[in-house]
């Protein structure tokens, strides 16, 4: 099964947050991401984890 990856911009739109907030969550370790060169890709599973952690 292939993992789906999203850009910071896509995640910001999905979560209705700013791109700056998404970058902050990545740097603080609250949102897992993979760094590819100078960009980040966020796996779908990381979005599920973040939503479940903040919905408790």
Image: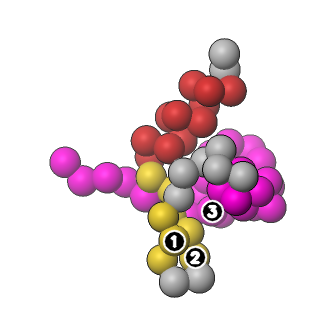
Q: Are marks 2 and 3 in contact (CB under 8 Å)?
A: yes
| Image coordinates for residue 54, horizontal then vertical, percent | 68, 27
Furthest toward the bottom, the residue is 37
First of labels 3, 1 by sequence position: 3
Residue at 48 percent of width and 64 percent of height: 34
Q: Is residue 13 visible?
A: no
Of the residues under marks 2 and 3, which one precedes in the sequence? 3
Considering only vertical position in the picture, is 33 above or below 29? below
Observer-nearest of 30 and 15: 30
* Quarter-of-image position of residue 52: top right
Mark 1 Cα within 10 Å, few/some/many (few <14, many 20+)?
few
Secondary structure state at the residue bearing disc 3: helix
Quarter occupied by the C terminus: top right
Looking at this rendering, what residue extends furthest in the top direction?
56
Question: Which portion, as a residue range, is magenta?
Answer: 1-27
Residue 33 image point, x, y percent: 53, 58
**25 magenta-colored:** yes
Counting from the top left corner in percent of width and height, residue 3 is at 31, 52
Answer whether residue 41 is visible to the viewer in this image: yes
Between label 1 and label 2, give the one nearer the viewer. Answer: 1
Real-space Cα separation, disc 1 to disc 2, in angstroms: 6 Å
Q: Is residue 39 left or right of residue 54?
A: left
User: Residue 35 got which mark?
Assistant: 1
Which disc number belongs to residue 8?
Answer: 3
Foreground of the two, 42 or 10: 42
Mark 3 vs 1: CB contact within 8 A:
no
Which residue is label 2 attached to? 39
Q: Residues within 10 Å of mark 3 (few under 14, many from 20)?
A: many
The reply, left or right, for residue 29 in relation to residue 6 is right
Real-space Cα distance between discs 3 and 1? 11 Å
């Amino acid at each position: 099964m292939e993992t789906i990856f999203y850009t910071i911009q896509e995640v910001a739109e999905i979560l209705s947050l700013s791109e700056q907030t998404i970058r902050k969550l990545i740097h603080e370790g609250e949102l897992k991401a993979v760094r590819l060169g100078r960009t980040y890709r966020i796996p779908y599973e990381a979005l599920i984890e973040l939503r479940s952690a903040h919905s408790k």
